[in-house]
Amino acid sequence: MIQTLQATQTLATSGPTVPAASYTLWGLTPLQLHDAYWRSKGVQCIRRDQRLHLQRAADLYLLLDPAQLVLFDIGLLSERLMWHNASVTRLRLIDETEERYSEHVVTDDRGLVQRIERRYRALVRGSSRVMLTRSRRVASMWMASRSRRDGWDRVRRSVPWARVDHQKCVGRTFIAGNESHERELLDDLIERWPCPSQSINGLQETAAGVWHAGDETTPTDDVRIGPLWLGQGAGGAEQRCLVGPAWLADASDAVKPGRTALLKDIADIELPDPGMRETADIGPPRLAYRSIKRLFDIVASSAALLILLPLMVAVGFAVWLESGRPFFFGHQRQGRGGRSFRCWKFRTMRPDAHQMARQLADNQCDGPQVNIKDDPRVTRVGRFLRKSNLDELPQFWNVMRGEMSLVGPRPSPDDENQFCPAWRDLRLSVRPGITGLWQLKRTREPGEDFQEWIKYDIEYVQRASFGFDMMILLHTAILVLRGRTSSAAE
């Protein structure tokens, strides 16, 4: 933490001069590689007291101090940037990347493996601030500023306070000219940037994830396993086997002049192949889908709550007549990004149902969820509500609040998601839904339920689109009328 806080203080007081880098890669300094990465996202880096040509094709301008280098997932902010439509977003980057989780094998009394848990722990090492804007005027004012305070004062005087948004985001900050910081930056870049040729001309990929300057040749019998970035003159005969993730800087006697001219303008950058695109990318197709889906969720859930209010009052009264209060049951589930929320439904079980579950051994599911035939915990009213799916009506409130969507993976608690960490991260990249592909296609075959859960969640995330969502909603409506759907949050 001390190192990062010292770096932040250096940023606040540093002048416009950036120390020269001690090495280059493809003739580019770490600062230039950093800026090239952001260009591949449609973002131009703008620094104080420096004269740059503002590219009109840029979706955003990232306002930085002269020696400041930052990495964060801008896709996680795309929805907020779209809906808030702020002139300036002040972004506080919190560095909690170190030791974010650990995995533990959980065994029973006999020593048999029950599951592998991923336990999350955020260690905050420091923070720094940047700004994002779509305004060329604001970007120009920042370039003309002599200090951070001067730049912020200019922005504050020209932009109404109501048009300034404030947001926190997990990210990392590095200092140009600090060799250890620059090496950490490149270590991070090679993991998150699969296609550097997006914004750098003259590169070629000789094997999957292996990149080097296009005018260089490599022996065909060498072993190269990506992700791997090879600088000019790097990876010679003495290095026959190289395994990534790794990078090798330019050899000092092999650097050719004029390589800085190889950075592409943002207008000339092509989108990567769909298989290489980040799941939360800020690109127009993905952003448009998420924005339209969220708007549809708000309108549809609000209308449903208004229309179904009399029915919900009647259901609540029926629950109270049989087993008293509470009317609702809110269970802690994980939403997008692993955020916890209470998933609401009408209570269909006895108040002590959770304690009784430990005493019942006839669970028919092969995975972590519980499904018991003729479950004694379920009340008579609860059986009717489950069969008719009326117990799910309160989840429209979760949809309106943005915790859920109409369509998505089943909302599940953390202790269920721990059974498969890789699948967990994929399914938590989108909002959970009231209905989804798994609820429609599951067969409940013995020993197959958990496998189908994984299969259909992955398929949904890979195929997600507004048309696909509408198809799922249509099929759900048909099955509801036939009384054949499964509870989305059972």
Image: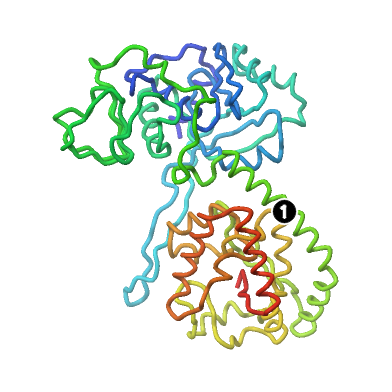
Q: Looking at the picture, tell me which residue is in the foreground, 217 or 352.
A: 217
**Residue at x 51% of width, y 17% of height:** 66
Q: Is residue 168 placed above or below 48 in the rendered structure?
A: below
Specify the amino acid type for callout 1.
Phe
Q: Is residue 21 placed above or below 107 in the rendered structure?
A: above
Residue at the extreme left: 238
**Residue at x 62% of width, y 73% of height:** 487
Counting from the top left corner in percent of width and height, residue 222 is at 17, 37
Q: Is residue 308 placed above or below 97 in the rendered structure?
A: below
For disc 1, the marked residue is 296
Q: How many discs appear?
A: 1
Q: Is residue 236 placed above or below 278 in the rendered structure?
A: above
**Residue at x 44% of width, y 21% of height:** 263
Counting from the top left corner in percent of width and height, residue 359 is at 51, 84
Quarter of the image with the N terminus in it = top left
**Residue at x 59% of width, y 64% of height:** 436
Q: Write down the quadrant of residue 193 in the picture.
A: top left
Q: Write down the quadrant of residue 149 in the picture.
A: top right
